[in-house]
Amino acid sequence: MALGQSKFVEKLVFGIFRISAFINILALTLFLYFIVKNGISAISWEFLTSPPKDMMTKGGIFPCIVGTFILSFGALVVSMPFGIGTAIYLSEYANNEFLVRIIRLGVNNLAGVPSIVFGLFGLAFFATYLKFRVSILTGISTLGILILPVIISTAEEAISSVPSTFREASLALGATKWQTIKKVVLPAALPGILTGSILSLSRAAGETAAIMYTAAVFYSPHLPKSIFDPVMALPYHIYVLATAGTEIEKTRPLQYGSALVLVVLILLMNITAIYIRAKKQDKV
Amino acid sequence: MKYNKRLTEKIIEYLLFIVAFSALTCVALIVIFLFYEGLPIFEKVGFKEFFFGKYWYPTSDPPAFGIFPLFIGSVLVTILSSLIAVPIGVMTAIYLAELASPIVRKIVKPIIELLAALPSVVIGFFGMVVVAPFLQEYFDLATGLNLFNASLMLAFMSIPTICSISEDAIYGIPTELKEGSFALGATHLQTIIRVIIPASISGISVAITLGMARAIGETMVVLMVAGGAAMIPESIFDPVRPMPASIAAEMAEAPYRSDHYHALFAIGIVLFLFTSAFNLVADYISYKYKEKGSATL
């Protein structure tokens, strides 16, 4: 009998495939179970709204939450014009295949750069060479480059999925190419662009290695006053609390609490993105 | 008025053309600054000593800058995590594209996306506080922070990459191919093995390559979970110190523009070259085997 002809073998192999898929669900469930179970008791209004106290062994994570928001939205602001511009060029203007391939190679290559290498680059270029020092500005520039490929590829997909009849109708009405892009193509591509932006926001918010030496500090007595100040950030806070210091066991609840807050933030962003995308697909 | 309009159009097109090179410019800047800060170490340490030296004692006197143990650490965590992640990732992809009902697909795909979105620092934290004590107790080890634990956590992170890219490739196979196979009397399993996997092998290879690239460059997980010993491990339960972990752990203590500082940037160069090579391979495969319709398969 030829390989895979028996119903029994087929059932067995398909069973293994099913189990593989199940392992993914199990992994996410186990992960969430431990983080939520151990983290939920640390969460309180005070934990979310007050700064750390007593050498970081008590108090809350308010400055870290603020810092994470500043860094991730800042990165998005830095990155979006370049990302969407590149996407518009690639899908609407570019007609030289070689050029497109080179640009795409750059984007793919950037997408594969390890986050610690972004950190090194941020330290050498923004912090040292441009003298931004360890600051919000250095952090959002570094993170902006890190999320650029995500923004480009999601925006490009959104723009090229706008039906060409939209463009033709607009051009037939006498609109110029740029007017068409601005008034017709971009509005139609907006949900897709929004999805990509939320995804990159979540990527930037969870990033640690890229901000360790460019923007984040372990402790800061006050919130940042300008973009030239360093900030506290949730991912870095979790890392430092979990690995450094003499009171690692004592601050375990704080670590779990911070991890839970970060995970919830990021899952919420991703679920929103998935929801927007699903809604758009239903419409089409 | 008309003239102005045309001029505006031209200006916008040129602006967008310049902007389109931003990603490429960033890659170029990254290369320039990595080399600028990394190359000076080779004035002090020879290439051979740097790449094949067995001792990484950057703060001793005299210091030793041999990255071989770090390199081996990176290679081992990548291989071991791929051994776990590739079968699970590809099999999940086959399940989702071929076997799952539309409803199951609609539920499981977002779950895998959420897995991909989990921040690495939290996965590292999970490995430290949940998996490590468990391994330590269950296998009676000196420490649960070791090669095996790091590989497990890395696998956890590369499965979604491998799975979603493979799934796209498998799902995109033209149905004629499947129907042709069924019409010849093949079972579903035979069709999967003989038709579907061969037809999507380029996509699956891209997925595996990118998954491995993600594992080799991942920093926080190996920093928190791999144990941090810069030595060549003898068992999978020995601690290791992969390259990204070294950079992240030591940059804080390396004095500005010291030999140690330059050596860490040089490790950054190695890391960058490695991940770029993986990405170029993936790019080459997907370009060469770009699907041109069912007729060419």
Image (cartoon, coloured by chain):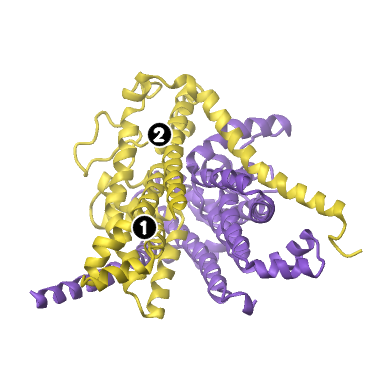
User: What's the distance in space between the residues labelled 1 and 2, CA to CA?
Assistant: 25 Å
Chain identifier, colour yellow:
A
Q: Which mark is residue A148?
A: 1
Kind of residue at disc 2: His
Q: Position of residue A145 (x, y in %)?
A: 35, 56
**Residue A237 numbered tag:** 2
Q: Which image quarter holds the N terminus of chain A? A: bottom right
- What letter labels the chain drawn in purple? B
Q: Chain of mark 2?
A: A
| Discs 1/2, front | 1
Give me the residue at 44% from left, 55% from top: A284
Q: Earlier in the sequence, mark 1 or mark 2?
A: 1
Q: Quadrant of residue A44?
A: top left
Q: Where residue A109 sits: x, y (%)?
A: 45, 65
Q: Residues within 10 Å of mark 1 (few under 14, many from 20)?
A: many
Mark 1, chain letter?
A: A
Q: Foreground: B9 or B264? A: B9
Indicate left or right for B47 with B37 as reference: right
**In percent of the image, x 62 and y 34: which residue is there?**
B132
